[in-house]
Image (cartoon, rainbow, N blue to C red):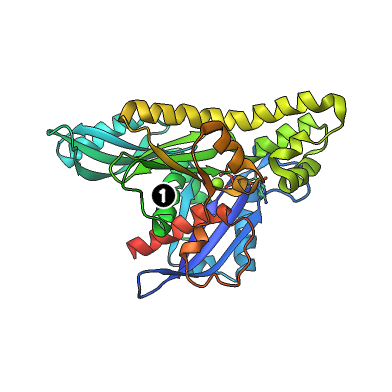
Amino acid sequence: MILGLDVGRQYIKTVTVEKLRSGGYKLINASQRLIPEQHKAFDPEEVSRPIVVMAIKEILKQQKVNPKRARNLVSNINGTNVSVRQIMTMDMATEELHSALTFEARKHIPMDGTDAVIDFQIFGQNPKEVDKIDVGMVACTKRVLNGHLDLLKEAGFKPGIVDTDPIALSNSFALDQDFPEDGVIVLLDIGAVSSSLVVWGKKDSFFTRDIPVGGHHFVKGLSDARKMDYVTAQDELYKDGVDAFNQSNGSQEIGLAEAQRTVFDNLVEDVRRSLRYYAKTTNQSFFQKIYLTGGGAGTPGIGDYIQSKLNIDVEVFNPLAALEGTEGQDIPNPGQYCVAVGLAIRGGIVA
Ligand SMILES: Nc1ncnc2c1ncn2[C@@H]1O[C@H](COP(=O)(O)OP(=O)(O)OP(=O)(O)O)[C@@H](O)[C@H]1O
Ligand SMILES: [Mg+2]
């Protein structure tokens, strides 16, 4: 059994799978738990480590999992605190590459006074430039990594494998879908505090960016626009989605339409900018489809909204569809489990 543990900033998600002889995976269970107090406005600044540890312990108790016995654990560091990039570099000895990449990594992660830690994998010769190689690199700071390891220890785990959100999302997608022959696909995981964008294709390079907009900003936007408290706004948003901004009486309507534009368009504009950057740096501008995941993907109407603004097909992706044993299980908002599924799968690849 492999446990994928997604430590989000608002929800803990767990996905337990069993690797089958066929090479596929069977879902044992998927669960989620709110980290902060229920029925209260969510404030990411108020979520301290003891609260997260408590939530992890509670969800494990619910699942009857003893963390000390969990041998195959894969957990994550979110996309805000890591840098995942594909880099083209001169072919050189591994030692040398390590120090060159560590130097490079410092440019891409928010430094906090501790050293950069990196991990990398050589993909092979660059198809266009003969003396260069393509390398996939993951980097974060020592403080971020140690903070995560301490969290796991406090929850009672031995650390296991530590992965990152963008890679987990990609693994989860690749389990279910083939990449198209031409062009690239876009994954957009709409979390609470931020969203992870991943662009990837069969023949094109991997790109990811963390976008500082998530479901929390949708709720706050609606709560400000319709002058309702956070929890009421959240209920309205889950029920009416994008249209929740249009429901009011008469005179206020124009203001509300504007508020809607701001909150969803902040996300759309960041996606647009990232795709433009990708097209410019890779010469690939054929974006086949945008797949939405994360809790925020459950916002009614958000897919159509993004599709109408960007003119790219949008679909909500169900990461559980690729797993066996999900028939008859009614799991609401399955897109929320995409990272946790990808983490669990990673455990299967290594095992
Ligand atoms: N049914 C739903 N409909 C709409 N939005 C939802 C629904 N359920 C959860 N959300 C929203 O999804 C967000 C939480 O999603 P998710 O669990 O992916 O975030 P997280 O992983 O905790 O956050 P982050 O990735 O930013 O660290 C919240 O903003 C929440 O309001
Ligand atoms: Mg998340």
The C terminus sits in image quarter:
bottom left
Is 98 displayed left or right of 278 in the figure?
left
7 and 183: which one is in front? 183
The structure residue drawn at horizontal position 30% and vertical position 41%, both measured from the top left corner, is 136
The N terminus sits in image quarter:
bottom left
Is 18 displayed left or right of 201 in the figure?
right
* Visible residue check, residue 75: yes
- Secondary-structure class at tag 1: helix
Q: Which residue is mark 1?
A: 170
187, above or below 209, in the image = below
Q: Quadrant of residue 174?
A: bottom left
Task: Give the residue furthest to the bottom.
Answer: 21
The structure residue drawn at horizontal position 37% and vertical position 32%, both measured from the top left corner, is 285
183, above or below 274, in the image = below
Circle 1: residue type: Ser
Q: Quadrant of residue 222?
A: top right
Q: Is mark 1 within 8 Å of ligand 2?
A: no
112 and 174: which one is in front? 174
Image spot of residue 95 (x, y percent): 19, 39
Task: Give the residue furthest to the left.
Answer: 130
